Amino acid sequence: MPEGHSVHRLARQFNDVFAGSVLAVSSPQGKFAAGARLIDGQALERAEAHGKQMFLTFSHELILRVHLGLYGAWDFGGDSTFTGASSIGAPRRIGEQEIAADSGGWGHGGPPEPKGAVRVRLVSAHGWADLRGPTACEVLTPAAAAVVRRKLGPDPLNNLPGDGEEFGRRIRKSITSIALQLMKQEVLAGVGNVYRAEVLFRLSLDPMRPGKSLQVEEARALWADIAKIMADGVRDGRIITTELGDRPSGLGAAVGHGLEDALLGSRPNKDVPVQDAHYVYKRVGQPCRHCGTVIAMAELGGRKLYWCPHCQSGKA
């Protein structure tokens, strides 16, 4: 499932290529025909991400809510003017990297015929977007959309005033482990398995600590670090959580480009090798980058949890 940084990149893409444009909306698959008719012929005013969900607001104030879930993806295509800040294409993940899917052509002044089970197609004067396989896809009134968003926890990438304090209040009121709580969208919106494992390591926090045991300062630090590394993910299109000094392969490769520049962090994160991108995620059985202890893995809440038994024991 795409983590929050991917959905924010998608929202940015929609704002870049569709905001202000009148869209023809259809459902080639047929399952969303009624919803498509409600927003067909309206201009897209803005796209917003909240956690793993995206909200597209149209000129008559109705809102298309999309949750990609495990299998959903957007494909984009268009003419030479159809470009945005994010890559054109659905965030197909290879490891944790987003790459552009084949966007197809723009022949004879319009999009190609839809391929496969396209739930929703959006078409402007210059481009198109196809949605396949979402967990949720519905048209809501502003009031109904507000209800959905109120059920979600604060989003570190929106980082509105008071969000950090609200996150701290939510995670500290329960005896449930912090590892489980970080995956609950009603506690914190947008964090998935990768960010969960990595931020707990970065702050040397025992994943099994009850939320109630966190000090206010620890909850604030947790929020701040999550916000930082997720913002890096939006910028880079990848989840990279290691600091420069903990990337031996990347540092070695950088010597030819100037060691001083590398130490100052001027090398783009796109050049960080996959094996150097994370501290603990999917590194079970490998040595910890800080202490050499073998990285552990266990099933928790139906997902794999990775951690360092030494650095995150509270005794390191």
Image (cartoon, rainbow, N blue to C red):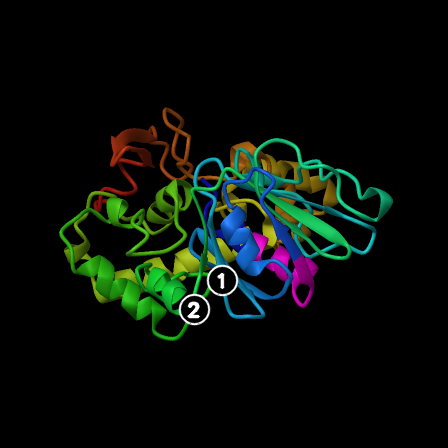
Q: Amino acid at mark 2?
A: Pro
Q: Amino acid at mark 1?
A: Ile
Q: Quadrant of residue 76?
A: top right
Q: Quadrant of residue 27?
A: top right
Where residue 19 sits in the image (x, y, percent)?
65, 65
Q: Are marks 2 and 1 in contact (CB under 8 Å)?
A: yes
Vertical order, 190 against 89 (above or below) = below
Image quadrant where one finds the C terminus: top left
Q: Residue 103: in sight, yes or no?
A: yes
Magenta region: 9-23
Residue 216 as seen in the image, left or right of residue 275: left
Callout 1: helix, strand or loop? strand
The earlier-in-sequence mark between 2 and 1 is: 1
Badge count: 2
Judge by depth and name the residue closer to the eye, 298 or 188: 188
Q: Residue 206: in sight, yes or no?
A: no
Residue at (25%, 49%) from the top-left corner? 181
Is residue 15 located in the magenta-colored stretch of the structure?
yes
Where residue 163 sits in the image (x, y, percent)?
35, 69
**Numbered mark located on residue 63 in the image:** 1
Using a 10 Å C-alpha cutoff, classify the residue at mark 2 as few (fewer than 14 neighbours), some (14 to 19) or many (20 or more): few
Vertical order, 261 against 299 (above or below) = below
**Numbered mark located on residue 142 in the image:** 2
